[in-house]
Structures are given as C-alpha cells and as structure tokens.
Amino acid sequence: MSSERSAAAGSPAPLCSEPAGADYRDWVRRSYLELVSSNHHSVQALSWRKLYLSRAKLKASSRTSALLSGFAMVAMVEVQLEMDYNYPKFLLIAFSACTTVLVAVHLFALLISTCILPNVEAVSNIHNLNSVNESPHERMHYYIELAWGFSTALGIILFLLEVVLLCWIKFLPVDSKRKTVPSVPVQSGEGHTGRDAALTSTIIMAPVGLIFVIFTVHFYRSLVGHKTERHNQEIEELHKLKVQLDGHDRSLQVV
C-alpha cells in the first residue's frame, strides 16, 4: 500500500515537466520566428529604399538631360555666325564638337531613364512588400548610375564649356564690326572689347568649373562613405542576429 501511494504521489512530476519543456520550446520557436521576420522586414525596407532612390535618380537625370540638351540645341541653332568675320578654326571645331558630345551624352542618359523608369514606377505604385523583387533597379543598377553620372557630372561640365565657347563666338566679331564701319569712331581701349568680354566670361567660368569638380568629387566621396558606414552597420546587425540565432539553436539542442 505504501509503495502504491508513493507511486501515485510521484506520478504528477513527469506530467508537469513535459508542459514546461513544451512551453520553453514554443517560446524559443516564437523568438526565432520573430527574429527571422524582423530581419526579413529590414531586408524588404532596404530593397524599397533602393527602389525609391533609383526612381529619384532616374527622374532627376531625365529632367536635367532634357533641359540641358534642349538648351544646347537652341544655342547651336540660334547662334548667328558673321560671314564677313574670319573665325579661328579651332573655335568652330571646338564649339561643334562640344555641342554634339553634350547632346549625345544627355540623350543617352535620357534614353536610359526613359527605358527603365516606367518599370520602376509600375512596381513602386504596388502596395505589396514582395513586389519590390519585380523591379529591375537591382539588375540595372550600373545603367542607372551611368545615366545619373552623365546627366549631372559630365553633362554639366560640357554645358559650362558650351557657354564659354558660345561667348567667344558671339563677342569676337564685335571688334571687326567697329573697324569696318567708318562712321563709328573707335576710341583708345575699345579695339579689343569683344575679346575682353569673351575673356571675362572664361575667367569667371574657370573657377566655377573647378568648384563644381571639387564639389562633385567631395559629394561622391561623402556618399560612398555614408554607404560604407550603412553597410558596416548592417553587417554588425546581421552578426548580432547570427549570434542570437546560434544561441537559440544551442538551447533547442539542449532541450
């Protein structure tokens, strides 16, 4: 009788230990799922941020390229060359080459933006987290950066050079007109007015172009540094997540 009573009294112990172990396993499983889901959402947020950044770059490059290429074409069409003035040969060649390269660079950037932007816009308007994988911005990343660089860096530098050449073409014939018109008296110091005006525009534009190049290099270095810091933070977060998951895996094996 005493043995039966002791057996009956000791029987609830294993029944209590099993629910405790089951609850602990459920808690570990829930923690694991929460960590995985949080990591999944962070990855999705990063993908969406890249999508919006690519869309903004494509929009900015398309607007800038359309505007500057239009100005270049208007400048080339509306410029009036003086037929009785002997322009320097290198000046006309430089103006023609600069205008052609400027329009070609901006049109190439506009072509890339026009081809990729509709696909990115179609995905960005869908309110679904998983739809970001359908966007081609990750695969076309190098083309997007190429269009952004052409429209902002190279295209603007060519446009500044276009302004300088246009000033030389417009102002150089002024001196020859004063000499060919006998009724207009030429005072001392006025014989090089056109050349001085063109030289002034060149002197002003040279530091502006240098400042633009320095700003562009500094901006891209700062942007690359910011991306590097962000990537390092993401790697640290992933390492912490891996350590936590390894700890949970060990606890599951112990249980």
Image (spheres, rainbow, N blue to C red):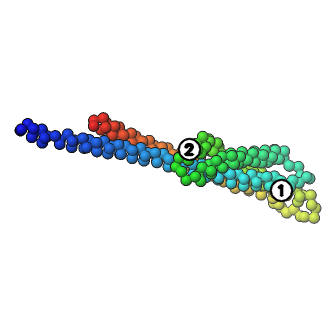
Amino acid type for the residue under numbered disc 1 = Glu
Question: Which residue is identified by label 1?
Answer: 78
Of labels 2 and 1, earlier in sequence is: 1
At a point 6% along the width and 38% down the height, the residue shown is: 1
Tell me: 23 left or right of 218. Answer: left
- The kind of secondary structure element at disc 1 is helix
- The kind of secondary structure element at disc 2 is helix
Q: Residue furthest top?
A: 253
Q: Nearer the viewer, mark 2 or mark 1?
A: 2
Question: Which residue is identified by label 2?
Answer: 133
Residue 63 in which image quadrant: bottom right
Q: Position of residue 140 (x, y in %)?
A: 62, 42
Amino acid type for the residue under numbered disc 2 = Asn
Count of residue discs: 2
Q: Position of residue 99 (x, y in %)?
A: 77, 48
At a point 42% along the width and 47% down the height, the residue shown is: 38
At a point 52% along the width and 49% down the height, the residue shown is: 129
Q: Are marks 2 and 1 in contact (CB under 8 Å)?
A: no
Q: Residue furthest right?
A: 182
Residue 250 in which image quadrant: top left
**Residue 81 visible from this viewpoint:** yes
Which of the two residues, 107 or 221, is positioned nearer the viewer here? 107
Q: CA distance from mark 2 to mark 1?
A: 48 Å
Q: Position of residue 206 (x, y in %)?
A: 69, 51
Q: Position of residue 132 (x, y in %)?
A: 55, 47
Which of the two residues, 169 or 243, is positioned nearer the viewer here? 243
Q: Residue furthest front?
A: 1
